[in-house]
Image (tube, rainbow, N blue to C red):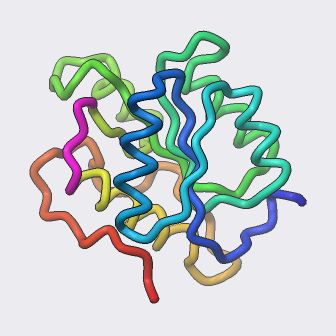
């Protein structure tokens, strides 16, 4: 299966080396109606992305085999059509490097411990961007400031 083809789906791939994070996101996102696959390494994530299309890849920044920035770069080099979002365990701090770097990378970021409403909103926004009409570019960072923790969330549930 080629992931460069934008196949309509409700699938999320979560990549993190922390089993507790994987378990939480799987349980929470599935409770909202999303189909969730969890993976512990970027190597396994690339293998999975060759098998199935995912509308969203949610990846941790700090992982032992490859950091999240490098992982996203390699996903984009392979023309995988998934939307991307980052996670970090450093919590929200306006002086954090991630917030400063955000001005250039412009992918949504989620801070651990997770704000459930923010997770739901990020997923819903990614679904909407991924499923836009054919011919439009996917999110390359032109969206609003996703690191803003105070926006009103959407329901986060997949469309019927």
The question of residue 113 being in magenta is answered with: yes
Closer to the camera, 129 or 40?
40
Q: Residue at x 71, y 39 (%)?
A: 75
Magenta: main secondary structure: loop
Viewed as shown, does residue 22 lie left or right of 90?
A: right
Vertical relation: 126 (above or below) 71: below
Task: Find residue 118 and report its horizontal and vertical position in percent.
Answer: 24, 52
Q: Residue at x 48, y 28 (%)?
A: 60
Viewed as shown, does residue 66 lie left or right of 102?
A: right
Q: Residue at x 36, y 67 (%)?
A: 32
Task: Find residue 160 and report its horizontal and vertical position in percent.
Answer: 46, 89
Residue lying at the far top in this picture: please name it.
64
Viewed as shown, does residue 146 lie left or right of 10?
A: left
Task: Find residue 156 and report its horizontal and vertical position in percent.
Answer: 32, 68
Magenta part of the chain: 112-117
Task: Find residue 63 and report its horizontal and vertical position in percent.
Answer: 54, 16
Classify the position of the N terminus by image quarter. Answer: bottom right
Vertical relation: 54 (above or below) 45: below
Q: How many marks?
A: 0
Closer to the camera, 52 or 55?
52
């Amino acid at each position: 299966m080629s992931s460069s083809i934008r196949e309509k789906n409700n699938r999320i791939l979560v990549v993190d080396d922390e089993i507790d994070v994987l378990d939480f996101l799987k349980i929470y996102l599935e409770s909202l109606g999303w189909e969730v696959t969890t993976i512990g390494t970027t190597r396994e994530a690339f293998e999975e992305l060759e098998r199935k299309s995912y509308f969203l890849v949610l990846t941790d920044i700090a992982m032992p085999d490859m950091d999240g920035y490098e992982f996203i770069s390699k996903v984009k080099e392979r023309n995988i059509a998934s939307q991307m979002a980052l996670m970090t365990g450093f919590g929200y701090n306006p002086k954090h490097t991630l917030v400063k770097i955000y001005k250039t990378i412009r992918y949504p970021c989620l801070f651990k411990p997770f704000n459930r409403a923010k997770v739901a909103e990020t997923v819903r926004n990614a679904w909407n961007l991924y499923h836009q009409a054919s011919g439009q570019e996917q999110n390359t960072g032109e969206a609003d400031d996703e690191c803003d923790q105070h926006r009103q969330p959407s329901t986060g549930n997949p469309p019927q």
